Amino acid sequence: MKRKTIRNHKDFIVPHDCPAVMGQYFIVKAKPMAKSDARYGVIASKRTFKLAVQRNRAKRLLRDWIAYNEDLMLPNFDYVFIARGAILDCTREIGRNKMADSLKKISK
């Protein structure tokens, strides 16, 4: 499956009734879509991460974890990942495992 990113602002908006998993390092929300491939979007807000270096690192970590666990992402869904402050202290292995756990929970 080829990973695609969400490009439009309106696609980042996820209704409250869609499944979501809140974790220590990120929040993931899934929205059913009519398209065939899974897409993802990454958010690292200025309110949470004051410096651009921190925002970029958080997004880079999330993208790495997504690439590692892309086989767990269901087709016909848009995934929005919101970084939390604790992500900067997380190791790669722990993050990948947490991402796998979250994607498994959301697919049920």
Image (cartoon, grey):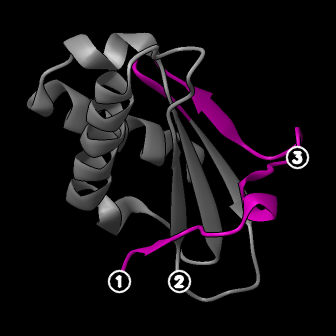
Q: How many residues crowd mark 3 within 10 Å: few (<14), some (14–19), many (20+)?
A: few
Where residue 88 appears, as percent x and y from the top left, is 26, 17
Q: CA distance from mark 3 to mark 2?
A: 20 Å
Instruction: Out of 68 and 42, give the one closest to the viewer.
Output: 42
Q: CA distance from mark 1 to mark 2?
A: 7 Å
Residue hosting label 2? 37
Instruction: Out of 51 and 101, give the one closest to the viewer.
Output: 51
Lateral position of residue 40 relative to residue 90, left or right: right
As drawn, 32 above or below 85? below
Q: Secondary structure at mark 3?
A: loop
Amino acid type, callout 3: Pro
Where residue 2 is drawn, which disc sits there?
Answer: 1
As for residue 17 lying within the magenta part, the answer is yes
Where residue 60 appears, as percent x and y from the top left, is 27, 44
Where residue 24 appears, as percent x and y from the top left, is 43, 14
Lateral position of residue 82 relative to residue 88, left or right: right
Residue hosting label 3? 15
Where residue 18 appears, as percent x and y from the top left, is 80, 47
Q: Quadrant of residue 106?
A: top right
As drawn, 21 above or below 11? above
Classify the position of the N terminus by image quarter: bottom left
The residues colored magenta run 1-27
**Residue at image coords 75%, 74%:** 33
Say which label, 3 or 2, has the lower sequence index: 3
Q: Quadrant of residue 100?
A: top left
